[in-house]
Image (tube, coloured by chain):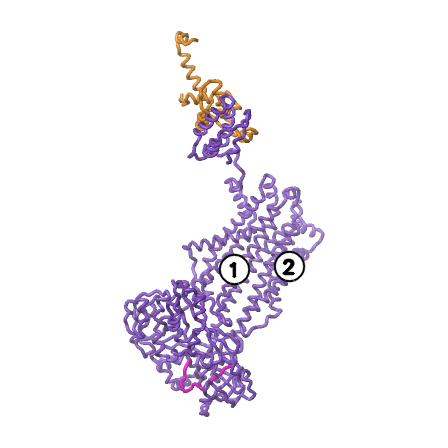
Amino acid sequence: MNPKQHADPGPAGPRPVGPPRWAAWLLSRWSHPDAREELQGDMLEMYAWWLQSLGKRAADRKYALTALRLMRPLARPKRATDYSETYSFSPAMIHNYFKIAFRNLLKSKTFSAINVFGLALGMACSLMIMLWIRDERAVDAFHTNKDQLYRIYMREYFSGKVQAVIWTPGPLAEELKKSVPEIEMTTPFSWTNQHTFSVGSKIHKQAANWASSDFFKMFSYKLLQGTAEGALRDRGNIAISRKMAGAFFGTPEAAIGKAIRFDNRKEMTVSAVFEDIGANSTLQFDCLMTWDAYVDDNGWAKDWGSTDPLTFFKLRKDADPAKVQAKMLHLLDKTNRDGGKPYKTQLAMQPFQEYYLNGNIKGDKMDGGRIEYVQLFTFVAVFILLIACINFMNLATARSARRAKEVGVRKVVGAMRSMLAGQFMGEALLIAGLSAVLAVLLVALLLPAFNSLTSKQMALPWSQPSFWGVIVGLLVATGLLAGSYPALFLSSLNPVRILKGALKFDSSSVWVRQGLVVFQFGLSVILIVGMIIIYRQVGFVQSKNLGFDRENLVYFPIEGELFNKFNLLKEQLTQIPGVKQVSHMTATPASNGNGTEGITWPGSDPNDQVRFTPVGIGYDFTKTMNLKMAGGRDFSKEFPTDSSGVLVNETAVKVMGLKEPVGREINWGRSKVRIVGVLKDFHFQSLHNAIRPLIAYLGAREPQGSVVIRIQAGKTPETLDAIERICRKLNPAVPFTYAFTDQEYARQYQSEQIVGKLAGYFAFLAIFISCLGLFGLATFTAEQRTREIGVRKVLGASVAGIVGLLSKDFLKLVLMAIVLASPVAWYIMKQWLQGFAYQIDIEWWMFALAGVVAVLIAVFTISFQSVKAAMMNPVRSLRSE
Amino acid sequence: MKRTFLGELEEVILLTVAVLAEEAYAVTVAQELDQKTGRAVGFSTVHTTLQRLEEKGYLSSEMGGATAERGGRRKRFFRVTAFGRKALRDVKEARETLWNAMSPQTLQLMGN
């Protein structure tokens, strides 16, 4: 308090004099808090009296002495003041708020249930999506050095275009460490492939890969045995997983130092055992061998022209990534990688942690991938929560007539607007709190199903404070969002108008409410359209005629002794009754992503290299695959010259611009090949990619890749058994593994299928929650118009007429939502379809179907209430008047 | 009979509050004491005693309305509670019993 205030003269004081300021200050600051107010006043009166009777000096002295005596610096207030200052958070008010809130909840059980259940569904949905996103983001986050880890990719510039490539030359890792001082450690990392390992009579296939000795120092894979330094020091070393150690040796301790046979040709020594790699790692492997060993087996990996492993590196802590990026840009210039070829290659880098979510190549950048689904589902989560919040807003404002009198009375006895807003906001938070509890229970219940749908192993992190933080955050956000509009609306009501007569909504609040319903149904329509299109596209992709028959087509890798025994294998396989055709091909029938730029033909542009997909095939390949010829003939044993012949597809003919392709000579690298036949286009990759030019050569002399077998429909199990028996006999050192082309093919659309299913569930949820809200609104309207309906019925209105009357207003809103949402849905789905080279057309009936579904569901929802209202006996509704 | 513990100063102040009736607050009590008894009782003593009496339940207090003088500050008015009145009566009775028990000679000696 300001001491100046106390300088005013006493009432009887002849002169404008006051007590000593410091003493007055002491009194105002340190006297007993319970008595502070009256003490100051009393002392002023006493001062005036002393002044009169004793004079100024004595009065000052007395005042000061008394003030000092009255100091109670340690006193705490004990006494509740008789007139407490009004503030909205006094215990009595809070008690009252809770009481009123609970009474309102219990008074209208339907509406409370709709609100709580709707919000709970919305929150559960968001929570589940958040768990999923958290899980996605946690991939590769366990590496201690994650902020210093990067991976290299290349940008190839050719004929004015840029293409990013993630595979890098084999020697790059070594070179990076030598020529860029900021780079501390590097490792190549090849394709992870299944290889055969054996110890004594134990034979297993394991996923193997190769890396440098830096690998375990860069990445934080936990070592159970061995050290990070020694794990991959020697070219005879192998680091194996706990599972692999268990399969061969029983325990990790028993495995260390033991020998293990690799592909039945090399003895490796176990130098380390690492903990099994979890699903939260992008790099997956059962065992690692040294890059040197890889180069020993694959001499071409020494060549700068090769494009094989991924390359990872770790920066020094103090290094500036931008500078490193600039330094490595032209690193490849001094190698002869691009020697003579018409394109240039530059290096670029991507933080290792972005690898998982941003794994797609878009032009010259690494961009997109799973991150797109993360974003998509983030939007969906927000949408659904929004729809649930809108329910709450609509019901709260529509039903505000019931609370209006309360608002009026509260305002008349002095409630301020902020207090009322706080009250209604608090009620929203209370309902959000109830919903949050329900939502957590729902999630706990549904998580196993969600896990199997997304093939993840997520669990609710009960013990993590951040989880509770998220829940509280979700609760508060929902409560504030849902409560904001009702709180502002209700607290703005004018008490005079409310208490004088019935509350009439002005047009703006009705408009807002209708707008919200339109918005809600618009979102639902978008989700329904999205679901229809995703379903259609995935179905289209799976049933599209690929140009070959993918049913009953089995394949398995050529490995071990099969390289040399293919003809024997074929001979024996063809004797199985269920086997129709046998052939072989490099790559697999489901996917062939190889590429070569070495094809030239008379008239080809040396500056515009076309990337062909090469494939080495065996005799009878076209018959096995059921491919159609567009011209020429298939490879045949009757033509020995076929070893220098090739088959091309129609796309290749088009690209080369050849009128009479059969019999023409073209160049492949330095050798000449002759086109003997033209294949009709078929899909050898997923439909995400367009059909590329294909060039097939006869690989019968050295069969590689896969054995492809056409089997008879209906005899699958016994045929497979017979095939397995033959393979075991011919190739005893390798376990038999096979795949069905149609299944493998479908697997390429796994994420689309999951997204399609999830979109279906979410669309259902969205429309369900919207309908909950619509149901509530319809109930409310029917209630409000009870008397009107009664009068109409007395005057002869039919039930159908009244149902129509009640439904019309809502249907208008739903129709408007469909009209507004359709273009948005069209745009969004058009974007999604861009990811496929072969797309379905978006047709009008999809929107019509979504619209009809929305309208039907809405009509169904409303009719519950409107029919009930229309059937009611008018005597009952009118009697109350 | 239950003994009432009431100090001498407490008794005087309690009596003063009773005398002042509706107008009893710390200032009037202090001035009344000064004028009627001539005792030099400091204001702080009066204030503290009033508070103590209230704590003991002999007095009740209530804030008055805001005043124009004394900087708009309210006054705390004190009133003797039923318990307080009983205490005063007890003290008085005890003294009267003693007075009445005095022999007439002694009374004469005291100037009565």
> Which chain is depicted purple?
A
Q: Nearer the viewer, mark 2 or mark 1?
A: 1
Residue A748 percent across, percent down from the top left: 48, 72
Judged from the image, the secondary structure of the residue bearing numbered disc 2 is helix
| Residue A743 percent coordinates (x, y) | 46, 74
Q: Amino acid at mark 1?
A: Ala
Display colour for chain B: orange
Pointer 1 residue: A381
- Locate residue A265: give its quadrant: bottom left
What's drawn in magenta, residue-wise?
A693-706
Q: In the visual, does A868 lie left or right of B89?
A: right
Looking at the rendered structure, the kind of residue marked 2 is Leu
Q: Position of residue A715 (x, y in %)?
A: 44, 79
Among the two numbered marks 2 and 1 on one chain, the one whose residue lies closer to the N terminus: 1
Q: How many numbered marks appear? A: 2
Is residue A703 shown in magenta? yes
Q: Label for residue A811?
A: 2
Q: Are marks 2 and 1 on the same chain?
A: yes
Residue A417 placed where, x, y %?
Answer: 58, 44
